[in-house]
Amino acid sequence: MPRVAFEYRDYWDVPRLIVCTVEGTEILLDSEFDESLEEYAAQYKVYALPPELEPGSMNSWANLPSPEARYLGSVSVSAIEFDPSGRKEIEVGPLLDLLRRRDPSLI
């Protein structure tokens, strides 16, 4: 399965806020911190970001997902396979599956 490079913010065991490009679509994976449980979610919420939003140009990731982002569904954090460092690349299989199920026009 192909891998893609990603950018991230927040790291606890694995990156918790990730942006990557899958088949030309900017994807956001967000595993939010739950204050009441004092732990991160076991699921990434997955969003398609609007084309005009480029991660490298963002000064802050604080407002992600943006209101223009399209929610695609969720994927288990454990379903995402990272490179050995856990900080450079992810396998895109689960994301491709989600994209194809939710919006075939994105791929």
Image (spheres, rainbow, N blue to C red):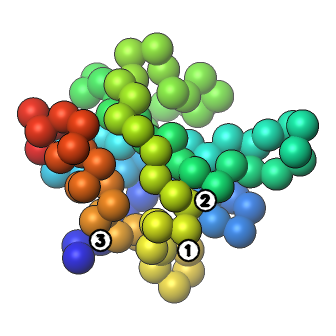
Tag 2 residue:
15
Distance, label 3 to label 1, CA atoms, is 12 Å
CB under 8 Å between discs 2 and 1: yes
Q: Quadrant of the C terminus?
A: top left
The answer to which of 48 and 52 lies nearer the viewer is 48
Is there any visible trace of residue 54 in the rendered image?
no
Q: Which mark is residue 3?
A: 3
Amino acid type, callout 3: Arg
Residue 78 horizontal/vertical position (percent): 55, 68
Q: CA distance from mark 3 to mark 2?
A: 16 Å
Whether 58 is drawn above or below 9: the answer is: above
Residue ranking furthest to the top:
67
What residue would you read off at disc 1?
86
- Amino acid type, mark 2: Pro
Q: Within 10 Å of the Cα at label 1, are there few (<14), some (14-19), or many (20+) other Cα atoms? A: few
Residue sitting at x 40%, y 29%: 71
Where residue 8 is drawn, which disc sits there? none
